[in-house]
Amino acid sequence: MMFGSDAALDLSGSFHVSTADYLRMGDNERFYARPQANDVLSVAAPAAFGFLEDAPASVAVEGNGELSTEIWGEDYDNWWDETDTDSLFPGLVVPEGETTSVIGGDINIKGTFFADEEYKTKTPLGTNLSAPWGQISLASVGGAGEVNVTESGLDISAELLGDITISDGAKITVNSASDDDLYIS
């Protein structure tokens, strides 16, 4: 599953994205990604993300990579001083106090950045995932198991974890003083 550099969210609640084979909701009700009898689709928040296969599909959130000088002309020393790069390159943003979860196989998050002429300094621009005063959870599993959603984060029963790569100036923002608002596993 991939979210390209122009992907944006327009919603009033939390956003959970996963390559899981099923979602467990409420009292062990399951909704399967593959059509099965007696599936229950619910608007309830997921209680767990279930993986049945040994190689769960990956999730990618792509930024724009390196921006060229064509965007700002020759005044590359000061162009971002007057630019709100978070609104110029917003990424996937949920409303204040809400949650974003990305749960799947390997997770790759690439940002947008400016590199100076000598390529010595990379300046990140914009954001990739943002949950102002909310919560962000990233979990990468490498095999069968469940990722349970708990009040203190995620509880992963899969024996094998996958890789999470955050590169090219990618930014993950929660704007919170709490240690429990960003979970990466």
Image (cartoon, helix red, strand yellow):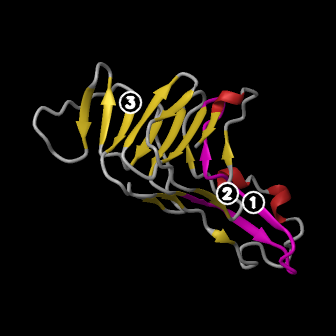
Residue 164 place in picture, x, y as percent: 58, 54
Which comes before the other along the chain, label 2 or label 3? 3
Residue at mark 1: 124
| Residue at image coords 32%, 21% | 26
Q: Which residues are magenta?
A: 108-134
Asked if marks 3 and 1 touch (Cβ < 8 Å), the reply is no
Q: Amino acid at mark 1?
A: Pro
| Number of marks drawn | 3
Task: Give SS at disc 1.
Answer: strand
* Label 1, label 2: how far apart the Cα atoms are: 7 Å
Callout 3 crowding tier (Cα within 10 Å): few <14, some 14–19, many ≥20: some
Q: Is residue 59 magenta?
A: no
Say if 164 sits above or below 43 in the image: below
Which quadrant of the view contains residue 121? bottom right
In the rendered image, which quarter contains the C terminus? Answer: top right
Viewer-closest of 53 and 114: 53
Q: Amino acid at mark 3?
A: Pro
* Label 2, label 3: how far apart the Cα atoms are: 27 Å
Residue at mark 2: 170
Kindly identify which numbered label has been placed on residue 46: 3
Asked if marks 1 and 2 touch (Cβ < 8 Å), the reply is yes
| Residue at image coords 83%, 77% | 119
Viewer-closest of 183 and 98: 183
Which comes before the other along the chain, label 1 or label 2? 1
| Residue at image coords 76%, 78% | 69
Say if 93 sits above or below 72 in the image: above
Q: Amino acid at mark 2?
A: Ala
Residue 23 place in picture, x, y as percent: 32, 36
Asked if marks 2 and 3 touch (Cβ < 8 Å), the reply is no
Which comes before the other along the chain, label 3 or label 1? 3
Of badges 2 and 3, nearer the viewer stands 3
